[in-house]
Each structure stands twice: as structure tokens, then as C-alpha cells.
Image (cartoon, rainbow, N blue to C red):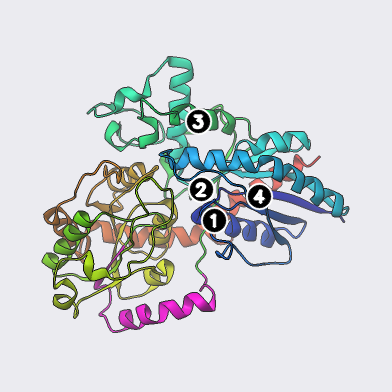
């Protein structure tokens, strides 16, 4: 019998690709009629030898599209930058699909599964006469936020930028509490830029898809998921948490040995882990405030400290040659018995370690789900994109996190004081806090959701069943 082929097109970002690979594994493991091809798009500043992904299963293949050149030195937002990169890759994706179908005569193309910034690929799917499905790698609440803004803008003439620097709040069906303008993603508040039209364009195209797969689970976001019932948007399939919890390559394992050995020497649930994602970094003044906050709190800590890219450059943070140059004088000596400052961190392995009792996070959705999976309480410190909304949801709607800040924006030059940091750390590490108890319950629910008979397991089955009925 001919295999049924799905083409996955993730955004060119580490977290998006990782989640896509894990979803492809879930689908092909669940139904042996299905195979998946994942198109890999590289960002202009990624090196040739940067790790993408190796073959993970016989039913999943990877096609690296030829590198394109596009300027990464502008002040465009990440959302616009990713959108521009994907547009440049669209004709290459069209050629790759044509070649795939020419070579693979025994395969039936069932459709495209596209990422949130990849809506230009809907046109390619239409050309091949197959449906598109959206894989939304963030929360159901944020999906509802985006679609609600688009509806208000298009049908009720809402001027979204009016919420900039305002105390006004907006009722959003996918959130329990009214959402304050201060936690809106900066891209929707920029009166001068072109981010809003781009975001609204993506939202309109979301509605063209046959279904939206969301990396979440009903037990976590029941309110948000229920808010879509009766909506005119495509059906929602919450099939998460989709995570890569496996140990990485031997090279990464070698880098992690020293870190894991240090954690092995710490008491259970005693260490606070500070890590701010693949794009997270701070200027020197904020680094010093974090250091003073850690030292004043008396908490044991493991701190992933990265050097910011050159100003105006859209690049990944790098390792510091000498961390002492950016830290307060004598900090490393004074904290040597209770803390460790590192560069890159094996985040999943650290969160899984029994010594870790708290996580200061940028609130990226992958990191949020990972911390829930391992039952580690989180203190919020969002940086960019939709992370402020994630922080608001975790602290206010779900009461599953404590707040250091929920409205921090790395581009505004605001400095969080050592006093606020220390206060947040002490709250985070409180062994008897309600947040810690709720986290432990949600950890159990997150794992049950993925088991046979669980909510996400069932929704994955619904998606496959619905998708197969649409195969040309």
C-alpha cells in the first residue's frame, strides 16, 4: 500500500524545529501508513556545520533546502525576519516538493504541516492540490489572542497600538483575566513598524488551514481550548506536551558532564536554575543586578550566562571569553560554594535533575512545557515575542508560576533590581508554596495526557483520522 506523506515546514528556529521533529515522531509511531518529510531552513547567521537534525526514524526524512542570503543586520523584529526568510525559501520548497513527488512514486502527498511564520507555504500546498495544517508551537491562549486581535482589527476597527504604554486591558476569550496592554507582544504595539500587518496577515491565513495542531494539553489550558468551541476558526487539536526529553549527542553529553557532576553534589530541590533561551542575554548592568540578587538571596544556583550579539545584529548569543569581566568583582569567589556560572546549558537534563528546585525562565513555550513535565516551579522573566503573555498566563490565569517580572522587554533598557530578583527567588524556592504543589499535580496530568487514553493521545488520533479523510 502506498505510504501517505506529510510535508512539515518548521520555522528556522531551534525550538520550532525540535518540536516539529517530536511531533513527526508521534505521528509516524502512531500510524504506520504515514511518513514525514521535514524541510530544514537555515538562518543566514547559522554556520554550515551547525547541528540541525539527524535521522530519527525510517519513516522521517530531512531535506535541507539550499541556503539563501538575506540581511540579518536590520532592526526588524524576529517575527518579520522569520517571515522574510520563509518567503525567500518558498520557491525552493516548491522545487523540493516537486522533486520529492517525482522520485517517490509510491507516496501519496496528504498535505503540508506548516509553522506559524510559514503561511506563505499554504500557496505551495494549494498548487499541489493538498490541504494545509498549522502547527502552533506556542500556547492555545496565544493562538486565541492572535486570532482575536485579527478579528477586532478587521471587523471592529480596533487600533491595537492604542494599548502601547497604557494601563488599559483587553478581554480576550482565550484568557481567564483581562489582558493588560503591558504584556502584549511588542510587535503588535509598534506604531512605526510593519509588524502588525505581518502578524494580522499570518492570522488570516491560519483560518485557511484545515486544522490547527497546538503544543498544549487540555488539562493545562482547558479555558483557552474551550474558548474555540463554536468559533469559525479551523478545528483545534491539542496534542502536547511535545518535548524532546532524550539525551543529546555525545558531544553535548561531554559538555554537560561538569554541570551534571556539580548538580550531583547538591541537596535535593535546592538549586535555582537561571536560563533564558537560545536568544536570551543581558547587558552588563543587568548581569550585575542578577548577580547581587542571587548573592543576597543565599540560594544555590546554576546560571546560564550568555554574551549578547553586537547591537543591531540578529544573531544568537555567544559564550563569554572571561565571565569575571561582566560579573561584580569577587562574585565568583564569594559564591563558589553555592553557585556555578556556565555558558550553554543542557536545559532538559538540568530540569530533570533532582537537585533543581526552581527555574528562572524567559517563558518560551517549550521551556514552560519542559518545566511542567519535570514539576519544577518557575519564576517568570520574559524577554521578547509572546513570552510576556506566557508569563501573564502562568502567573495570573493558571497560578503555576511566581513573578520576577511579567512585562520585561529586553529592548526597552529597563533594569530589574537585585531586590526584586532576590524577592522572586525566595518566593520561588519556598518549599511549601501553593505554586509548587500545583506544579506537582500538573506534572502528573501532563504525563497522563500523552498516555493511551489520555486527552492528547486521543486528539492525535482525531487529527490523523480527519487528515486521512482529506487525502486526495
Q: Is residue 457 left or right of residue 308?
A: right
- Give the mark, 3 or 1, whose residue is nearer the N terminus: 1
Residue 19's label in the rendered image is 1
Name the residue carrying label 3. 198
Q: Is 374 in front, or is 244?
A: 244
Q: What is the span of residues highlighted in magenta in the rendered image?
A: 246-274
Mark 1: give few (<14), some (14-19) or many (20+) Cα within 10 Å: many
Residue 8's label in the rendered image is 4
Mark 4: give few (<14), some (14-19) or many (20+) Cα within 10 Å: many
Where disc 2 sits, the SS reads loop
Distance in Å between CA atoms under marks 1 and 2: 7 Å
- Give the mark, 4 or 2, whose residue is nearer the N terminus: 4
- To which quarter of the image does residue 168 belong? top left
- Give the mark, 4 or 1, whose residue is nearer the N terminus: 4
Which of labels 3 and 1 is toward the front? 3
- Are the two marked residues, 4 and 2, in contact with CB atoms closer than 8 angstroms? no
Answer above or below: position of 221 versus 119: below
- Residue 288 part of the magenta segment: no
Q: Is 244 in front, or is 32?
A: 244
Amino acid at each position: 500500500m502506498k505510504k501517505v506523506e506529510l510535508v512539515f515546514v518548521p520555522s528556522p528556529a531551534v525550538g520550532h524545529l525540535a518540536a516539529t521533529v517530536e511531533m513527526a515522531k508521534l505521528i509516524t509511531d502512531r500510524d504506520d501508513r504515514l511518513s514525514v518529510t521535514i524541510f530544514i531552513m537555515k538562518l543566514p547567521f547559522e554556520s554550515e556545520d551547525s547541528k540541525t537534525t539527524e535521522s530519527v526514524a525510517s519513516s522521517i526524512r530531512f531535506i535541507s533546502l539550499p541556503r539563501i542570503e538575506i540581511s540579518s543586520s536590520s532592526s526588524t523584529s524576529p517575527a518579520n525576519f522569520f517571515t522574510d526568510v520563509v518567503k525567500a525559501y518558498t520557491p525552493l520548497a516548491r522545487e523540493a516538493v516537486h522533486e520529492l513527488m517525482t522520485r517517490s512514486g509510491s507516496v501519496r502527498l496528504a498535505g503540508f504541516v506548516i509553522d506559524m511564520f510559514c503561511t506563505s507555504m499554504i500557496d505551495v500546498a494549494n498548487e499541489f492540490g493538498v490541504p494545509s495544517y498549522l502547527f502552533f508551537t506556542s500556547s492555545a491562549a496565544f493562538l486565541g489572542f492572535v486570532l482575536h486581535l485579527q478579528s477586532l482589527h478587521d471587523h471592529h476597527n480596533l487600533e491595537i497600538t492604542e494599548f502601547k504604554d497604557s494601563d488599559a486591558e483587553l478581554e480576550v476569550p482565550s484568557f481567564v483575566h483581562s489582558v493588560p496592554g503591558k504584556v502584549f507582544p511588542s510587535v503588535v504595539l509598534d506604531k512605526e513598524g510593519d509588524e502588525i500587518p505581518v502578524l494580522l496577515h499570518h492570522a488570516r491565513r491560519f483560518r485557511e488551514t484545515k486544522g490547527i495542531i497546538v503544543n498544549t494539553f487540555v488539562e493545562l489550558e482547558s479555558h483557552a481550548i474551550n474558548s474555540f468551541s463554536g468559533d469559525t476558526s479551523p478545528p483545534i487539536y491539542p496534542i502536547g506536551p511535545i518535548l524532546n526529553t532524550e539525551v543529546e549527542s555525545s558531544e553535548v553529553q561531554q559538555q554537560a558532564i561538569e554541570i551534571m557532576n556539580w548538580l550531583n553534589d547538591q541537596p535535593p530541590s535546592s538549586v535555582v536554575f537561571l536560563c533564558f533561551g537560545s536568544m536570551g542575554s543581558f547587558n552588563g548592568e543587568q548581569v550585575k543586578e542578577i548577580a547581587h540578587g542571587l548573592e543576597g538571596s543565599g540560594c544555590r544556583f546554576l546560571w546560564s550566562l550568555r554574551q549578547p550579539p553586537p547591537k543591531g545584529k540578529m544573531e544568537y548569543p555567544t559564550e563569554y571569553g572571561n565571565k569575571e569581566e561582566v560579573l561584580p568583582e569577587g562574585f565568583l569567589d564569594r559564591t563558589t560554594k553555592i553557585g556555578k556560572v556556565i555558558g550553554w546549558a543542557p536545559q532538559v537534563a538540568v530540569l530533570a535533575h533532582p537537585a533543581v528546585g526552581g527555574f528562572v525562565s524567559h517563558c518560551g513555550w517549550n521551556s514552560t512545557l519542559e518545566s511542567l513535565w519535570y514539576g519544577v516551579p518557575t519564576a517568570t522573566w520574559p524577554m521578547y515575542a509572546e513570552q510576556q503573555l506566557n508569563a501573564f498566563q502562568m502567573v495570573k490565569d493558571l497560578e503555576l508560576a511566581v513573578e520576577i517580572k511579567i512585562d520585561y522587554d529586553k529592548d526597552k533598557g529597563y533594569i530589574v533590581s537585585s531586590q526584586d530578583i532576590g524577592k522572586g527567588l525566595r518566593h520561588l524556592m519556598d518549599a511549601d508554596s501553593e505554586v509548587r504543589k500545583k506544579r506537582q499535580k500538573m506534572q502528573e496530568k501532563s504525563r497522563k495526557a500523552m498516555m493511551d487514553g489520555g486527552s492528547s493521545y486521543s486528539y492525535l488520533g482525531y487529527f490523523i483520522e480527519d487528515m486521512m479523510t482529506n487525502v486526495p
